[in-house]
Each structure stands twice: as structure tokens, then as C-alpha cells.
Image (cartoon, helix red, strand yellow):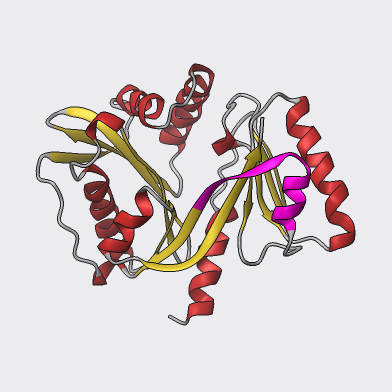
Amino acid sequence: MELDKKRNLVERATWENTQGRDGQEVIVTPNWVQITSPFAPTPFMNGVLRCELPEHDIDLRVRHTVLHFRAKGLPFRWKIVPSTRPADLGQRLEQNGMVLKEKLFGLYAEPGELKIASNPKVRVEAVTLQNLEAWLAVQANAWKVPPLGIEYQRRSMTEALKNGGRYENYLACLDGEPVGSAAMCVNNDYVYLMGGAVNEAHRGQGVYRTLTAHRLQRIAELGLPAVVHCLEKTSAPICLKLGFEKICEIHSFEPAN
């Protein structure tokens, strides 16, 4: 696949996999995607995922957006990809009290071309209503999701498991203990790997690698390419060693305080 097409998939994954749930406000236009989750006070569930606006509109929009989330008392993030406009949006966000919080790599892979060794001590299973509480414990531990966010995830995941959809969630157990989780979203022309995390006490034991291998095997069966956004200093080095290709960088800004 040509580089431009790969970049298109990687960038689209930034905003196309937003899952609207009860209680959420999701704004989607051809040049703007914003999500507000009053019952999930975490930057992962609140913020701007797409922004392609002319320069004469952006300063007012930035101020209004910052005030929107502050008025609700919600932490939030603002993602910048290569197609973000205006090109100096990062500087404008900094002028409004935001800082670069995370740098992510947008990665691409053809699953059938990767050979990933799993840890045989790690068992990966689909999240169900029966193991939901174990999955939630991992969210609280690995992701540091606060209690209010856990309650929201319990409700939303229960609904999702009952209704089905294009999201698949997985739980990883090491020697029988739930220690990691991951998910993926199946789209028409790619699959987005998401939500991969391992409890801090169990990192470095191949849990993340095994979760990735399990999902890639599933994606290979679907005959689609895989896209993932990885933190520069944690999961990105792992995925690059596994054979993923770096396509671009994604910058995530958050309020300084």
C-alpha cells in the first residue's frame, strides 16, 4: 500500500473509532470531531480528535472549547495529526494554557507479514459479562481510571456486550491473574488496535506482546491491515520491534493545570 494511503488510515483512526454512548455528547462534522463524557472524567473520553479549520476561525474555537470542558470540570485532550489545520495549532493551544502531554506514533502493519512470539503463560480471552469485573479491575490498575469512570465503563461495557458491534475487547491473564487488556475496532478497510495496557507490576513479561499477537491473528483472518497509535516511549518501541511501520506522529495536548 502507498504511503499516502497508509497515512490516511492512520489519521482516520484518530477520530473514526469514537464510540457514542449514553450520556456522551459527540460532535462530528467533516472538519471537526469532539467528544464530551460527563460521567467519565478522564482525558481519554473527552476532547478534540479532529480539527481542520481556517486560521480566521481557530482562535475563537480554541477558547470556546477550553471553556466548554473547564465549565464541566472535565479533563480533556486535543490531538494533532499531520492533516490538522491550521498547521501551527500546537502553538495556539499552548497560548491558551495547554501543553504537549504525549507524543504518539501512528503505526501500520499487514498482520500476515508479522511473526510474533506469545508468552504461553498468558491466556487471552474475549471480554464477556462473566469476566467484566476482572476487566474493570485492569482498567483501574493499568489505566488509573478513577471510580466514577469505572462505574461509567461498567454501564457502557455491559450495554455494548449485550448489543454487540464492531468493537472487540480482550482480557489477558498471567498464571490465572487478570493483568492486561486490549481492544480493537473493525472498520471496512482497516482494524484499529486500541486500549492496550498492562498492570505495572506485570510489565516486561510479554503480556502486551501476547495481546497484540492475538489481535493480529484475528485481523489476519479478516484480511485487513492493522493500525495502532502507540506512546513514543512505552508501547511504540515494542510494536516497532514486532514489525510495525511508523507512518506519522500524533501529538496530544492537555491543559497545564
Rendered view: 152 above or below 195: above
Which quadrant holds the N terminus? bottom left
Rendered view: 80 above or below 153: below
Return the x and y of residue 147 as percentages of the image width and height. Answer: 48, 17
Return the x and y of residue 248 as percentages of the image width and height. Answer: 51, 66
Q: Quadrant of residue 68?
A: top right
Return the x and y of residue 175 as percentages of the image width and height. Answer: 12, 31
Give the residue at x 24% y 59%: 217
Return the x and y of residue 63 as percentages of the image width and height. Answer: 83, 42
Please identify the residue farthest to the left as the structure is shown. 120
Give the residue at x 78% y 40%: 65
Rendered view: 223 above or below 228: below
In this rendered view, identify the residue nearer to me: 202 or 145. Answer: 202
Q: Which region shows up in magenta?
A: 89-103
Q: In the drawing, does residue 5 fall left or right of residue 205?
A: right
Kindly tell me whether residue 77 is visible in this rendering.
no
Kindly tell me whether residue 252 is visible in this rendering.
yes
Q: Quadrant of residue 139?
A: top left
What is the total number of numbered labels drawn onto the structure image? 0
Give the residue at x 30% y 55%: 238
Q: In the drawing, does residue 150 fall left or right of residue 206?
A: right
Which quadrant holds the C terminus? top right
Residue 97 belongs to magenta span: yes
In this rendered view, identify the residue nearer to me: 112 or 204. Answer: 204
